[in-house]
Image (cartoon, grey):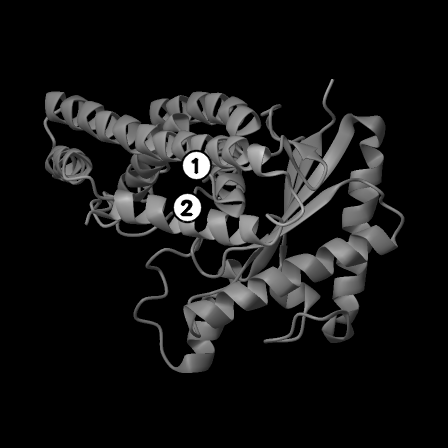
Amino acid sequence: MNRSYSLSLVATALLLSGLSATAETLPPQFLPEILSTSLARSDAQAEQVRGYWKAKAQCWADLSSAEASQGDTHGTAMIAAGNSRRIQDALEAGNEPDDAERPIFSRKYVPSKDERYGRPMWRADIETIDGVLNRYRERKCRTAKLGCLEVAQQSVYENMEETRGARWNHGRPEIDKALQLASEASAEFVANCSTASLEGIDVSKLERPLEVIEVPADTLFKFGQAEAKGLLPGGSEAIAALASKVKGYGTRAGGLRIVGHTDRLGSPAYNERLSQQRASTVADLIKATGVALPMTSTGVGSAEPTTGDSCKSVKPRQALIDCLQPDRRVGVRILPATR
């Protein structure tokens, strides 16, 4: 039995078990109509997921063609073509292609915010793209545009990995394409993913943030801590400065998105939890200053380092901890008010 049929049977079984509790209180003639409506909804969701995979297969194929036409110096065209083929093969077999894809980059690198040596706006745009993808994941929803956006995001990070040692001199077209897809994916999110907002922030309005502020976590918290009681004296000043900056935007500010980051030391589960707790604590502390804007807080652990490979050979451990300090940070994106 293939997986898609198995899922349909499971959904039907769950549906019937839920109906049994109300069967004695409903007139029998209504039950077929309720069952039919629920099954139709389940079929529509299954078709939406299939549309996601079909679109993703096509976008992998398109990326493969584009890379091949440029010489494919890094083997991206071959990987992308393989991803497309495996997705299509799984769909034809009636299976979910969850294990069909291979990444085209090895690690996420983002440009520095330094005006001289980095690309602050590129970085803000990449974070906007990632933010849309995170909202989909939080809602556990998949649409056709999401499939293509995930491919475009991989292309962005592949280019960032290639150009990180050359002052970020290429990759802007890939960012622009992903931004356009992020805008289109946001519209599909509103139409297909249960709710148009995430804790008060309208995802149908995809705009660049007014400002992205990053505070070193070592300035805010004692090492390994995430609660308000672990806040350092300098942390209180940093929170006050953040709140003042937000208030300075007045009615132009529509919300905050707060993202916690850690270094690569420790287990992935621990780092995700620590980064989430720190982001949540910062959100609470900003609210305590009187900022009443809608806020979301997310932790991404060590998934988005800024140090790259620069600390790879650093020893002993304390020197490594010091080297990785830029990765331990909390980012605050000040989002514009919707018009």
Residue 249 image position (x, y, % from top left): 80, 32
Residue at image x 54%, y 24%?
Answer: 191
Q: Is residue 187 left or right of residue 43?
A: right
- Mark 2 surroundings: few (<14), some (14-19) or many (≥20) residues within 10 A: some
Number of dots carrying numbers: 2
Residue at image x 47%, y 21%?
Answer: 184
First in sequence, mark 1 or 2: give its number.
2
Q: Residue furthest front?
A: 28
Q: Is residue 170 visible?
A: no
Q: Is residue 281 above or below residue 25?
A: below
Q: Amino acid at mark 2?
A: Thr
Q: Which residue is mark 1?
A: 42
Give whichever of 202, 173 is nearer the camera.
202
Marks 1 and 2, Cα distance to the nearest angstrom? Answer: 9 Å
Residue at image x 10%, y 27%?
Answer: 71
Q: Find residue 12 and name its label.
A: 2
Q: Residue furthest top?
A: 339
Q: Is residue 282 left or right of residue 1?
A: right
